[in-house]
Image: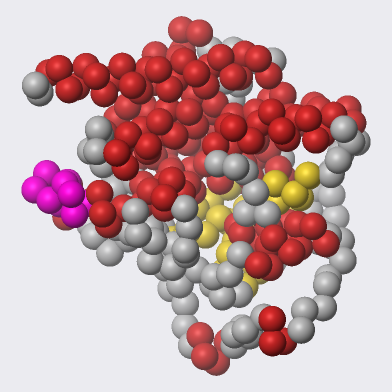
Amino acid sequence: VVGTAGLPPTVAAIEAGKDIALANKETLIAGGPAILPLLKKHGTAMTPADSEHSAIFQALQGVPPNGMRKVILTASGGAFRDLTAAELADKCENEAEWVRAKATTHPNWDMGAKITVDSATMMNKGLEVIEAHYLFGADYDDIDVVVHPQSIIHSAIETQDNSVIAQLGWPDMRLPLLYSVSWPHRVRMPQDQWEPRFDLVELGSMTFKGPDNDKYPCIGLAYAAGRVGGTMTGCLNAANEMANEMFREGAFEYLDIPRVIEAAMEAHKADFIQEPSLDEIIEVDLWARRFVKDFASAKKEVFA
């Protein structure tokens, strides 16, 4: 289940006392202010199935409380990782349909259309920053994003004694999914069901660089929404979901995605709620989607 559609069934499962293996990051991004108190109230465990957060969760096993200093989220860089900000802007201006086709193709992972576009804008990584804050209690100043094109280190933590603990493997969702339902156990998998085995010699080398914030403004928007908290993260998420969908349908251009998200966040300041109920979170979600649709309609009228 993609997006905030996963919020009601997650709440129902928590209230029924079921442990949650969370693959739907938007549940925490939009619903964190309401979900975290529910988890505590019902004594329910939540384990991450997303590859990056599973990596962090695995790295934390055996680390004592307050032993983590920093979260290091790795990112493939998405479809446009080999273009400069200027080159991408030129492509958007002169080859809009090439950009649309490229944004829906991921270089490393086989994923759905929505998350593939989120990877291209790197909003996916921005959303994961917010999810890491809610899952692991890390302050936003202590969550770093690093572009790692090979997608071998799925994420890492830095501990208080300056050690860095990472989880490595080929880009394969089977392990994080397995660990999310088998934790705290390690299930032995037959070799013929887990090929190819990870091999450092075959890998050879890895590379890393910082994200280009000019090329990927969605990362900054996610950090800004997270620091505000409350309903702002839900506004960011809903505006992104709708903008992403309308981009794929051809109603938006690529660069319209961060523009409309920023506009929605600015407009939402007037009705922002710091400690929202679940119903208020859903209301903000619906409002942000309408805002994006109205934004697209206004743009269409201007250029008609």
Which residue: 42% across, 28% down?
Answer: 239
Quadrant the N terminus occupies: top right
Foreground of the two, 33 or 278: 278
Identify whether 212 is placed above or below 76: above
Residue span colored magenta:
90-99
Percent x, y for residue 14?
82, 34
Secondary structure mostly taken by the magenta-highlighted segment of the chain: helix
Identify whether 137 is placed above or below 187: above
Foreground of the two, 268 or 14: 14
Which residue: 74% across, 64% down?
Answer: 178
Quadrant the C terminus occupies: top left
User: Per the image, is 125 magenta?
Assistant: no
Left or right: residue 87 versus residue 255 is: left
Left or right: residue 303 versus residue 251 is: left
Residue most extreme to the bottom? 201
Percent x, y for residue 122?
41, 48
Percent x, y for residue 246?
32, 34
Left or right: residue 217 versus residue 17 is: left
Which residue: 49% across, 32% down?
Answer: 237
